[in-house]
Image (tube, helix red, strand yellow):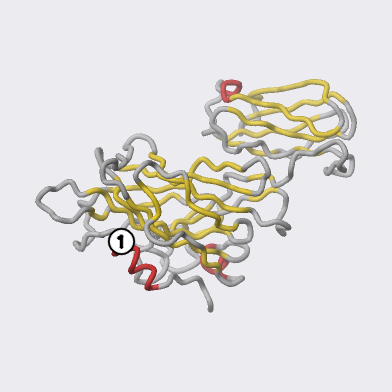
Amino acid sequence: MNLIRPKPERIVSIIAGLLLCVTAWSQSAPEITARFANPRLNDQHNNLTLDVELQSAQPGQSLFGMNVRFFYDASALKFHAFGDFQGGYGVLGEAPAALKGNASSGYLLFHLEKAAAYVNSAVQLLNNSSPVVISQEGWTRLFSVSFDIPEGLDQPEEICPSLIWDLKDKPGKGGFFKGEDGLVITVVNKDPGEKVESKAARVSAKPFNWAYSAGAEEYPYGAPAPEVCFTLTDLLSSDLPLPGNAGGFKLYQNQPNPFTEITDIGFVLPEASSAVLHVFDAAGRTVKRVEGQFSAGFNSVRFKKADLESNAASVLFYRLETADFTSPVKKMSIF
């Protein structure tokens, strides 16, 4: 069975470069959580970027470095690069690259439909004068990870790709491969009595569009849990055929999704007519209703977070309604 395996020499070089302390991990180590956040699709709909963010359970912890190891859904994404680093940090060693597993690797490991790919790299403080203090209350952004969306993707127009940190569901259990640490994070050692620059943290991780199976010790370790999805359909121009149902209607996923301030909902009408965008909560209560006369072809309505502040829910739903058509319901999320 040809699953993804990191190269041993690569692992050794990264850990050596990070100057991980040689003392064993213990319950007294600082606790750091990593997550992927703020997903955004670029204007051409062929590149997806997310931020890597950290949170500390203890105050005053400064990041030294991390072994950046994660899996992703290779059927939907192709790894591109790290970028937009916080000042003083950068890639340690060679530029990060991805290793793709065989066609069954994603399903066997993570219940993905097709192949999984694996990124194994390292990020470290390169300028010791400006270590980042990891937030205890919020999240501290360290850098971004970008992916290309392959042309001719054999997928529906809406995708919900999974990104999974190489870490089991509880601190101290290590990575998914036997005997390997997986995601490792170190903090600046502030003890003047010790000569090492860094010390290891207890690490936990929040995967993106994926959830652990509680207590799973063998693969598959969990399964996709879509919360954030993206539409791959470009904005339409008047000289292109209009996709949609048999009547020419179409409702798109809001962009961006999730959103923090503003989001746009696009839709297509086969001819000029009145239409309603109906936004509601999980109980079916109306949160916002936008009614108007819209033109044939592509239309878009912008919503501000303030428009929806009367509802405390972080997940809302919407549909398009006309005299001749009611769309399937779509979901949007608010940060």
| Looking at the image, residue 211 lies above or below residue 103 | above
Residue position marked by numbered label 1 in the rendering: 17
Front-lying residue, 79 or 109:
79
Q: Position of residue 290 (x, y in %)?
A: 72, 22
Q: Secondary structure at mark 1?
A: helix
In the displayed image of the protein, which residue is found farthest to the left? 193
| Residue at 90 percent of width and 31 percent of height | 271
Q: Residues within 10 Å of mark 1 (few under 14, many from 20)?
A: some
Q: Position of residue 174 (x, y in %)?
A: 35, 63
| Looking at the image, residue 174 lies above or below residue 238 | below
| Residue at 36 percent of width and 52 percent of height | 204
| Looking at the image, residue 272 lies above or below residue 201 | above
| Residue at 21 percent of width and 57 percent of height | 26
Front-lying residue, 34 or 151:
151
Answer left or right for 283 relative to 175: right
Front-lying residue, 283 or 211:
211
